[in-house]
């Protein structure tokens, strides 16, 4: 069988030097032209305005992408930011993250400084990323066409089949494959997108409606991490190519009690 090359395709678009949209994926050669068209259209017809600068990067991957399964997805029935914070404390502290760290993450994400990448925080709330202003960008992840079709179908049943949810699930699924990462808290920087999430291997991807008030133009990501080599983790997040080829179930809205009770106890190392 001939070797099949994979390519990382990444797009970033700006208007008057302000970031308006971005996208990325891992594709085979024959799909590159179609994807470049799709990404370019996205940048030119974005809600936040037509981009005046679009950067595309197409890079052949020297390493074979690691195939993984997506995290299961569910939505918590939260109605306001206070309820989200309370639920986040319950979920994150059950994973071993201290209240101090959770408080620190919420405070940092609400300071109004939007970072390009994610904060890395240990379970005591100490920041570990080398560049505290930029954070760590997760890149070189994607989803196969088949898995994307399965995911779209599942999300459509929940009224959630959009790029924002899909891309966040792909990113989180890559991040939480790495054992040093215990959990993630994410708030969109889009002023009109008020649903955030918590992700972890034990509970999957939990969507959190009303994590912020409409109109708030900042957000961010915090990865809670435990002992290990931070350099290796950063290398994995930024460089190791990961491709989702299987989808775990996506379900509707649950109560906190239901989510806490359903914590799956999967064997370490199982997909
Ligand atoms: N790597 C690390 N951090 C990132 C990355 C990345 N590739 N992309 C964005 N961030 C950080 C950065 O600080 C952004 O300001 C912040 O995360 C939020 O990014 O299921 O849209 O792209 O409905 O605004 C959650 C979806 C959407 C919830 C999250 O994030 C759902 C979203 P955004
Ligand atoms: Mg955004």
Image: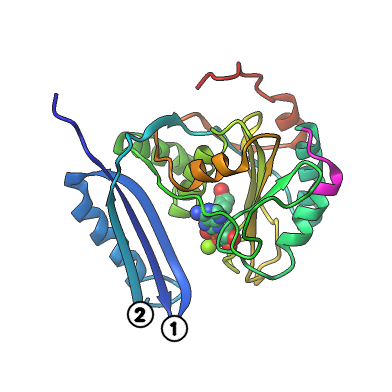
State whether residue 33 appears in this view.
yes
State whether residue 80 appears in this view.
no
Please tell me in which quarter of the rendered image ligand 1 is found: bottom right
Q: Nearer the viewer, residue 90 or 93?
A: 93
Q: Residue at x 70, y 70 (%)?
A: 112
Q: Residue at x 50, y 41 (%)?
A: 236
Query: What secondary structure is found at the residue carrying circle 2?
Result: loop
Crowding at dot 1, Cα within 10 Å, few <14 / some 14-19 / many 20+, comes out as few
Label 2, on which residue? Answer: 52
Q: Residue at x 36, y 61 (%)?
A: 11
Apparent side of residue 7 relative to residue 202 in the rendered image (left or right): left
| Image coords of residue 147 (percent x, y) | 36, 34
| Image coords of residue 35 (percent x, y) | 26, 54
Label 1, on which residue? Answer: 16
| Image coords of residue 152 (percent x, y) | 40, 41
Q: Which residues are magenta?
A: 96-101
Apparent side of residue 5 relative to residue 137 in the rendered image (left or right): left
- 241 in magenta: no
Q: CA distance from mark 2 to mark 1?
A: 7 Å
């Amino acid at each position: 069988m001939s070797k099949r090359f994979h390519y990382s395709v990444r797009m970033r678009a700006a208007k008057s030097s302000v970031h308006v949209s971005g996208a990325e994926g891992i594709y085979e050669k024959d799909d590159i032209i179609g994807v470049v068209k799709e990404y370019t259209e996205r940048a030119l017809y974005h809600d936040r305005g037509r981009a005046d600068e679009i950067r595309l990067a197409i890079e052949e991957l020297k390493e074979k992408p690691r195939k993984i399964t997506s995290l299961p997805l569910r939505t918590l029935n939260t109605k306001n930011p206070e309820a989200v914070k309370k639920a986040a404390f319950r979920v994150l502290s059950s994973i071993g993250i201290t209240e101090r760290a959770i408080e620190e993450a919420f405070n940092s994400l609400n300071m109004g400084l939007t970072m390009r990448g994610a904060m890395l925080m240990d379970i005591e709330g100490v920041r570990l990323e080398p560049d505290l202003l930029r954070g760590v960008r997760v890149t070189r992840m994607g989803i196969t066409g088949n898995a994307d079709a399965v995911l779209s179908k599942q999300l459509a049943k929940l009224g959630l089949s959009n790029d924002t949810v899909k891309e966040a699930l792909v990113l989180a699924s890559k991040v939480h494959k790495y054992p040093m990462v215990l959990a993630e808290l994410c708030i969109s920087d889009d002023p009109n997108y008020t649903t955030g999430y918590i992700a972890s291997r034990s509970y999957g991807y939990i969507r959190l409606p009303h994590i912020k008030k409409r109109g708030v133009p900042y957000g961010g990501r915090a990865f809670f991490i435990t002992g290990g080599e931070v350099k290796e983790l950063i290398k994995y997040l930024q460089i190791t190519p990961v491709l989702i080829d299987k989808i775990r179930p996506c379900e509707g809205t649950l109560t906190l009690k239901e989510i806490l009770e359903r914590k799956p106890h999967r064997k370490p190392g199982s997909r």
